[in-house]
Amino acid sequence: MNTLALILLILFSGAIVAFLSEKVSKFLPSLIAFISITAAGILFYTSPADVFNFKLSMAGLNFTLKIDEFSRLFVHMIIGLSWLASMYAVGYMQNKERQGTFFFNMLLSIGGMLGIVAARDLVSFFVFWEIMTWSSFLIVVWTGADFRRTGIWYMVFSAMGAYAMLMAIMMIYSDIHTFNIDEIIAAIAEQRLPHLVEASVLLLFGFSVKAALMPLHVWAPNAYTQAPAAYTAIFSGVLSKMGIFGMALVLLSMLKFANPADFSLVYINGFIGQILAWLGAITAAIATLYALIQTDAKKLLAYSSVAQLGYITIGIAIGTPLSVMASLFLAVLHALFKGTLFLAMGAVERQAGTTDMTKISGLIRRMPWTFFVTLVSIISLAGVPPLAGFVGKWMLYEALITNGNVFMVVVVFFSSTAAFLYSYRILFGIFLGQEEDDTAHVKEAPLSMILPMVVMALLLIALGTYPGLLFDPIAQGMTVLGFENVTWQMTVLSNVWGNTVNLMYISTTIGVAFVAALLFLTLKGRKGSRNVGTKDISTSGEIPLEHENLTYQLDFFKPFERAASPLYRRKMTKIYDDLSNGLDALFDFTRKIYTGNGQTYALYVVIFLVALLIYVQNTL
Amino acid sequence: MEGLAIKILGAVITTIVAFAVGMTYGGITRKLTARVQNRVGPTIFQNFIDLLKLQSKKTNIYHGVMGHFAPMWIITAAITVLMFIPVLHPGTAWYNSWFPNLSFHGDLIFLLYMMVFGSLGMALGAGQTGNPNSAIGVTRGLSQMVGFEIPFVLALVALMVQYQTTSIQDIMTVQRESGVWMMFSNPFSFLAALFASLGMFRYSPFDIVGAPAELASGPVSEFGGKYLGTMMSGGSIFAFIKLTLYVDLFLGGAYSIPELLIKTFALYMIPVFYGWVNPRYRTEQAIRYFWGWPTALGVIGLLIAIF
Amino acid sequence: METKKDSQTIAEYIKNWSRKHSLFVMAYGTGCGAIEIPATMTSRYDAERLGIRGAATPRQADVLLITGYLATKTLKRVIRVYEQMQDPKYVIAFGSCTINGGMYYDSYNTINVLEKYIPVDVYINGCMPRPEAVIAGFKQLQDKIARGDADNGTRYKENLDWYRANQQQVIKNWRMPDYNW
Amino acid sequence: MLEQEQALLSQVTSAFPVKGKVMRNRRVEVWAESTTVSSILMYVKNQMGYQHLNHITCIDRIEDTKFQLVYTVFSHQTKMTLFVKTFIDRNAPVMDNIDHIWDQANTYERELREMYGIQFPGLVGAQEFILEDWDEMPPMRRDFKTEEYSEKTFSSLPGRENTQDVRETISTRSGEEIPDFAKKYSRD
């Protein structure tokens, strides 16, 4: 049997088995999910690369699935993160109700994502897209909390995106009578697709919804917050990347392969790219600003995900080799560090009961491993050397600067500097600060939850010095997108102006200096060095009592908020609310025509007849 | 092998020079401040004495592992940045013998991010002490950083676009070859960066982080002894780094140590002078300050650089 | 005096020299004497020329300056601050009140002798001592440091039982936490 | 001459069974039973515009075994101060709580409770006000021997018990005369 079909079959049947097995044992669905993802992963990595082809003709349609080099990059992300998250979910979902539904949907959405990246025709693409959307929707509303704000927003925006995509697909089909993506690209190259621009814009609209781009992002923060952490890691880590995948498909495969001689088309491509890039930059800035005023760690990370997706969109939209590389690198990294962060927050939620930063503090000694992975991912997120986040940030900046998008660089720089604020907020809010008595009972999460996080954290550390490990698959994937001969080096970054950064030297210098400082500070006067608790602080001689909480948690960035208050004045949700209210009023007004009164209807008939008579009179 | 030994020796010498210069500048500032206030003031080497005293404290308190690591992070960041910054002009004799270090292997954006590394460690260490003053100080520092980073980045982007390079060495070379310093070829960007430097050096009116008499010295309020001493050394090296970076980028670099000292000292006096005559801003005032005229100047500079 | 100085090793001598010339003062403004400190630190008397400088928290401080009378309530805080300071540390008691109670000698809630509760290196008498006297006191402390006599923290640790007994006699409800020192 | 004051006095005395007198310009005092004080205060606050409670003072009349309480209220309209004075038993000092009339009375009453041991039924607030861990007699009572207590609790170091006047010593050492005005402040 075909390997690709088998992988999908394993996932989908695993989903059904997981759903049914809840009747047997509460514990079983999580195990089945883990086993089926493991099986799919083993199957994928043990098979040679050329077997992932699958063709099926049914009802006059040709379904084509194929994993090429570009899809393979995303498959790595999907399988890797899903595997770790499902391992984590075994411990995380322990003692929770309705696990069968959860794991059913989780496996379904993973299968859906694999289908999306493998799809080579628009019909199966759309089908898998909808499977992914619906299963993720069901997980978002799984807890049942706050359905109105979360579920409806998500559903409405997903539906809008899906309609736009469907319209685009139909447009393309009506032009060239095929769904096959390769044939479509060939058609574009031969300029046989008159509705290319409209179809592209509609497709991009659909993908922007998933990638949570600026005006369409309102569903994301709540949805990311509401989903259980084990799934949010996948949701924010890879599921949102499906939008990026689609954008890459449209911007880089479809529009790029258009005839360069067609001036207007090239112009349009650059224009659309610029608009998308600016939307990405604005998304990054605004979402960062909103992230740093959150008090719930998960919601903070949700906003931060939106911001990071903004960066990734910029890279794809600019479309130079370096920017695409930066974007794909950041996409993988985002899956790693945001996956880790969401998992870590899930661990905190499970162990301490909440992720509200105003309620907990000082968990560093209680959950040292969780702190370690959070620290590593936060440093990566902030883009501070020597961890991997810096590589992505550097490439993005250099791509923008060398490309001449100088004002966009400033916006991006602003948002990534402001990102330091929420990065610190999350580390401080949960792990640092006063150690309180009400968190004294908190224990470290079980090994099965720690292990996935530590694996990802170690990957982030390794990629900080050896980004080439990731450049290799990215460069291969970019070949499919039409960037031939992308040059990369294992430890050296370079831009088109020939400026380089050698990561090996950076890591070595930091390592040597740090070890020297560590030895000096630890050994020097070690007899007199004492570690004291966080209650032993100088509070003007006052002795804080046990119940007195001295941690600074509320209104953490109030001064910044005050300084940036004009930027906080408008909220996108409010605009949508106003829009829907306005539409409501409009339709309400329209409805008034139907009064339910027979005389009024008679009057309408008379008016219509008179108008008709006048018209006929005039024309005659 | 011999080359490596020389390189390591050069790195050590660079560090010592940076440390000594930074500490002495701090001492000179204290002396000058005293003279301005009609006092005698301490000797210009007072900071060295303070450091020696702090390092010879018999007991040292730390609050948890991040508190112990924080000074190391700072000094690590300081030394790393120093290694990647060209202290003198490439090509000069002094440079080739003692100060090349690793300045071929890093560029401007790397330095910008690397500078944050130390602040991050500091913030984490201050956070773990659990002192509310520390956390308030850190949030103020971070907020202020978002403030001054905008004019600073505008200036730097203008620089990089104008010279079509992101390498500091290339920027210095271009300035030398053209004979025009950046501060004259694009004065608006230079001014924007200069305003940003006011926030970077944290003298009043931008001393909201430490905020003496208000926050009990802010982030460092729980650090003493060797920890405070190490932070002080790191801070001094950072002062030297910032000054050298400004000299490299805007004042065409320096050919010799005396020239470097003159240029850096002149630059250093700007935030110090500005501080003498100004009271302290509130955080939001400081941020608004940087988002006002300095940003406008930065935008003008960037427009000049593009067209 | 000189013999003691000679008996120091060179390292100790250098350390003491640096300690002498860099005194970070935690000015604990307990009483009316606090008003003399600004005068001492600012332009006219300029204590900074001797390396004397204010410290914001006890962690950074070397000298605890008790300026004036101490209520029992304040004493608790002073002990706390003193114990949070890091060795070597010095205490300067300032004004008559710290010596024998001064004008509060018969008050029901003001301690009379500071030395019973924390070890004192230098007393500056007067009510109030003028800045000249304060600087003279600092000079005396510096001499003491240079001789290596100022081992305040050690004295406290060695006689901790005696100090604790005295402290607990005054502070009846002893709620000082265990973790503090 | 002092019409305003007389009018005030007569208004209060007509409303309540109290006696009083005009002390001087804009100062009027009334003497009341301790049980009527709160109603007098309520009355003058609500009906006569004495919105401001300046202070509550206690005087220890140990000879009469009584505490004298003085409530000082002030009118912003007429700029007059009214002193409502009363005696309570020193051995069982209980007084009406008036912090429902003026919130700030709470502070004064807590201080009186701590310093004189006067109980105010219904007074809310921590038992400790200024003193910490005080288990002796309330220290402001006149039969509390503060010097004895001080010597007992804050005893001097051995060899330094004598808190003598050192000015003699200083003057002989430096050869200066003690001026006469200084001599009369001598402790002996």
Image (spheres, coloured by chain):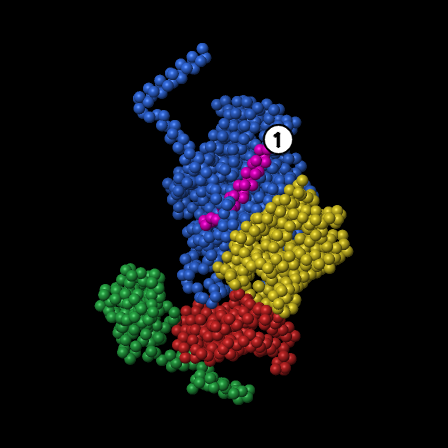
Chain colours: A blue, B yellow, C red, D green
Neighbourhood count class around disc 1 (C-alpha, 10 Å): few under 14, some 14–19, many 20 upward:
few
Q: Which residue is drawn at 52% across and 33% down?
A: A205
Where residue C52 appears, as percent x and y from the top left, is 58, 70
**Residue with the mark numbered 1:** A267
Residue sitting at the far front: D1
Where residue C50 appears, as percent x and y from the top left, is 61, 72
How many marks on residues? 1
- A540 or A468, which is in the foreground? A540
Output the chain of dot 1: A
Residue A288: in magenta span: yes
Q: Is residue B299 left or right of residue A122?
A: right
Where residue B121 appears, as percent x and y from the top left, is 56, 56
Q: Which residue is drawn at 50% across and 76% down?
A: C128
Residue C63: in magenta span: no
Q: Which residue is drawn at 37% across and 40% down?
A: A23
Q: In this view, does A189 lie above or below A553?
A: above
Residue stretch in magenta: A271-297
Q: In which quarter of the image is residue C46?
A: bottom right
Where residue B288 appears, as percent x and y from the top left, is 55, 50
Task: Specify whether residue D168 is in view.
Answer: yes
- B260 or C67, which is in the foreground? C67
